Amino acid sequence: MKLYHHPLSGHSHRVHLFLSLLGVPYELAEVDLAAGAHKAPEFLKLNAFGQVPVLDDDGAVISDSAAILVYLARKYGRTDWLPEDILTTARIQKWLSVAAGEIAYGPCAARLVTVLGANFRADEVIARAHRVLTLVEAELSGRSFLLGDNPTIADIALYSYIANAPEGNVDTAPYQAVRAWLARIEALPGFVGFRKTKIGLAA
């Protein structure tokens, strides 16, 4: 099993983290985004969208971080991370959509401005980040993880960009429930961190 990734990609880190938490064997293959390796013909054969991460599981190729999280949980029968009842499945899917929407256009985008010089309006994406963090803070009030006492792939999908949000000048200090949740994830056996960049509020 090979994970094509980039160490500064939170989408990649989600999958790297989950693989490590599962304790399954895997190989990391770094894709040189700065050199345009993700747009090279060989990589486009793996993912025509030219994005990381991509998981190659002995010829079964899966792209999109959320899809890979679902694949891995189902492949290894990890109903602790992705329960089978329909209500919990729907609740997890909601958070996967938040990861692809509000998180991507909030804390992720704010970080892209500082780390990669992305052409977003910093004030707008920082405001979006605080809106979603306020919602996550409320969701975590009185519970350990997004769906209750135990982590699911919903928590993994949100972790990386929230953990590194200060790099995008998003202050997480006011969100005490969020910060406690980050610490709980970081205490899980097999945890691997998302590479830090000394920039923004993290400088």
Image (cartoon, helix red, strand yellow):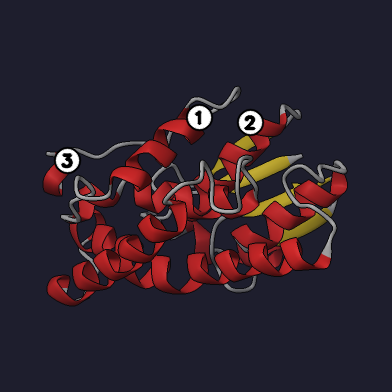
Looking at the rendered structure, the secondary structure element under dot 1 is loop
The tag earlier along the polypeptide, 1 or 2, is 2
Residue 203: horizontal and vertical position, in percent?
Answer: 12, 39
Residue 196: horizontal and vertical position, in percent?
Answer: 30, 37
Going 52% across and 50% down the picture, which residue do you hit?
A: 12
Front in this rendered view, residue 10 or 30: 10
Q: Do labels 3 and 2 touch, CB within 8 Å?
A: no
Q: How many neighbours does mark 1 have within 10 angstroms: few (below 14), some (14-19), or many (20 or more)? A: some
The tag earlier along the polypeptide, 1 or 3, is 1
Q: Can you say whether 130 is above or below 35 in the image? A: below
Q: Is residue 106 left or right of residue 4?
A: left
Q: How many neighbours does mark 3 have within 10 angstroms: few (below 14), some (14-19), or many (20 or more)? A: some
Q: Is residue 172 left or right of residue 162?
A: left
Report whether residue 109 is seen. no
**Residue 192: numbered disc:** 1
Q: How many neighbours does mark 2 have within 10 angstroms: few (below 14), some (14-19), or many (20 or more)? A: some
Going 85% across and 41% down the picture, which residue do you hit?
A: 76
Front in this rendered view, residue 143 or 172: 143
Q: Is residue 167 left or right of residue 10?
A: left
The amino acid type found where label 3 is placed reads: Ala
Structural distance between the alpha carbons of marks 1 and 3? 19 Å
> Image quadrant of residue 24?
top right
Residue 91: horizontal and vertical position, in percent?
Answer: 65, 66
Report whether residue 38 is seen. yes
Q: Please name the residue that numbered disc 2 is placed on.
A: 20
Front in this rendered view, residue 12 or 22: 22
Q: Please name the residue that numbered disc 3 is placed on.
A: 202
